[in-house]
Amino acid sequence: MSSKDVLGALGGMLLSGDIKIVDCTAQLGPDTPIIHLPEDFAVNTPKVEIHKISEYDADGPFFAWNWLKLGEHSGTHFDAPHHWISGKDHEDGFTDTLDMQRVMAPVNVIDCSAESEADNDFLLTADHVKAWEATHGEINPGEWVVMRTDWDKRAHDTALFLNDDPDPHEDGSHSPGPTTECIDYLLSKGIVGWGTQCIGTDAGMAGKFSPPYPAHNYLHRDNCFGLASLCNLDQLPPKGAILIAAPLKIDNGTGSPIRAMALVPKH
């Protein structure tokens, strides 16, 4: 089939419902969980604020609109390479300079939900990924890889979602993520990016890894992308879906809240 035929068929399948759109995005508002770092270590992102400008009233008789206060890395969000020091030299590493051809791609969904429920500090290893590939097929260059943990079911409770350690200088927080070797292996496969359902792309205790925060460190070093606080990954198959994760075109943006969506075959 030609590309024109493929797009035509895709349009028809979207209209008929043979391909459904799964919303992989968390609600963005004042109650959205925001990562909290030790105050003696870094300045934190403020909570999301939504302020009314007008709502069919004296401030705007025919229209309603709001203004927002939020960080680039709030809610379901996109990490661009310039988010981390290892990616600071990529000219196309900002949200307004990156190659948009890369942000829409097939997605590999690795189900770690049972392991993460049993152990909040569960770590996905390279051997886990290789075993998954033996069952579901190879991870290909240019594709997304996401870790399903069903952590989004905790999003109604910020404390439960962040799962912070009582002493943030000890383990930071208790949430699942990848090992250093896992991210290294995935990058060797040529992936475009890595995503999780937790507050960040790394495990909660990844500050103690070598190097610290390997998902951030290695992904952005290689000019690849990160996705955090994804939702509804339980509605995606291990393979066969297309993930769309486009950030706002922020001037010199290091990241952006996104409306992540997946195109999923009905059957």
Image: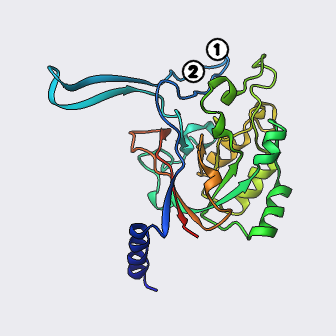
Disc number for residue 44:
2
Viewed as shown, does residue 206 lie left or right of 74? right
Residue 198 in sight here:
no
Earlier along the polypeptide chain: callout 2 or callout 1? 1
Q: Secondary structure at mark 1?
A: loop
Residue 189 in percent (x, y) is at 71, 63
- Residue placed most toward the observer, 203 or 190: 203
Q: Residues within 10 Å of mark 1 (few under 14, many from 20)?
A: few
Residue 90 in percent (x, y) is at 53, 48
**Total number of numbered labels?**
2
Q: Which amino acid lies under the numbered mark 2 shown in the image of this protein?
A: Asn
Residue depicted at 77% across the width and 17% down the height: 166
Disc number for residue 241:
none
Residue depicted at 40% across the width and 82% down the height: 5
Is 185 situated above or below 95?
A: below
Is 266 situated above or below 217?
A: below
Q: Are marks 2 and 1 in contact (CB under 8 Å)?
A: yes
Residue beneath disc 1: 39
Q: Residues within 10 Å of mark 2 (few under 14, many from 20)?
A: few
Residue 38 in sight here:
yes
Viewed as shown, does residue 228 lie left or right of 27? right
Viewed as shown, does residue 148 lie left or right of 249? right
Distance CA(mark 2)–CA(mark 1): 7 Å
Is 110 situated above or below 161?
A: below
Residue 267 in percent (x, y) is at 58, 70
**Dividing the picture into quarters, in which one does residue 123 lie?**
top right
* Residue located farthest toward the top when viewing the structure as drawn: 40
Residue 125 in percent (x, y) is at 83, 51
Q: Secondary structure at mark 2?
A: loop
Residue depicted at 78% across the width and 32% down the height: 205
Q: Which amino acid lies under the numbered mark 1 shown in the image of this protein?
A: Glu
How was the colour assigned to the protein in this rendering?
rainbow
